[in-house]
Image: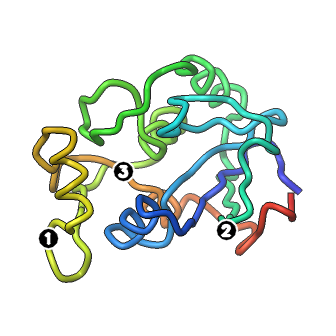
Amino acid sequence: MLENGDLIFVRDESDMGQAIQTSTGNYNHVAIYLDGMIYHASGEFGVVCQEPADFFESNHLYDIYIYPEMDIQSVKERACKHLGAPYNASFYPDGAGFYCSQYMAEILSIFETIPMKFGDGKQEISDFWREYYRELALPVPLNQPGTNPSQLAASPLLECKERNLHDSDF
């Protein structure tokens, strides 16, 4: 089912996943499938290359998108170059390492940055994000340039291939 260059967009029910989805849209994570492996930036591992069996989880839903013009070899070279980089937990544009959509935008340079949002529909900055950044001892980077998985998925350059897949579909 997965093919080289597939972009995997993830929805989950974790607190962080819900906070990201509430602030930005349908997805809270993005990864890419290259030569049988999943490349992504995760809070747990930083920038990593994993077996699909180690990536897919039963409590997540997955949508698959493709970029028909992708030069897979050059994307893989850029993806490998950043393996081992830390996770950019601050989401600051100049933070060390990468967060998931920042990594995708780095290796597949077709995405623009947009002003980052941290609201929940009621507040410009949700309680979740206030607490998250209080623990980091940083101001919330509201309106700083960044990316998010939902924004990447909305790119007119991408085509949706499959929706609402479960871990058992892979």
Residue marked by disc 3: 147
Distance between the Cα atoms at labels 2 and 1? Answer: 27 Å
Q: Measure the C-alpha gap from mark 3 to mark 1.
A: 17 Å
Q: Specify which label sits upstream in the sequence, 3 or 2.
A: 2
Q: Nearer the viewer, residue 158 or 61?
A: 61
**Can you identify the residue that label 2 sits on?**
61
Q: Which of the two labelled residues, at mark 3 and mark 1, occupies the earlier sequence position?
A: 1
Q: Which mark is residue 124?
A: 1
- Distance (Cα) linking label 3 and label 2: 21 Å
The label nearer to you, 3 versus 2, is 2
Instruction: Check disc 3: other Cα within 10 Å, few if <14, some if 14-19, many if 20+.
Output: many
Task: Residue 66: name its quadrant.
Answer: bottom right
Callout 3 secondary element: loop
What residue do we see at 30% from left, 42% from top?
Answer: 91
For the image, the number of numbered tags is: 3
User: Mark 2 vs mark 1: which is more N-terminal?
Assistant: 2
Q: Give the side of residue 169 with respect to residue 104, left or right.
A: right
Amino acid marked by disc 2? Leu
Name the spot of residue 111 as percent of width and height, x first: 43, 48
Q: Circles 3 and 1: CB distance less than 8 Å?
A: no
Residue at x 71%, y 39% (from the top left corner):
38
Quadrant where the N terminus lies?
bottom right
The local secondary structure at tag 1 comes to: loop
Q: Is residue 118 above or below residue 47?
A: below
Name the amino acid type tagged 3. Thr
Q: Amino acid at mark 1?
A: Glu
Identify which residue is drawn at 49% across, 72% down: 26
The residue drawn where x is 71% and y is 73% is 163
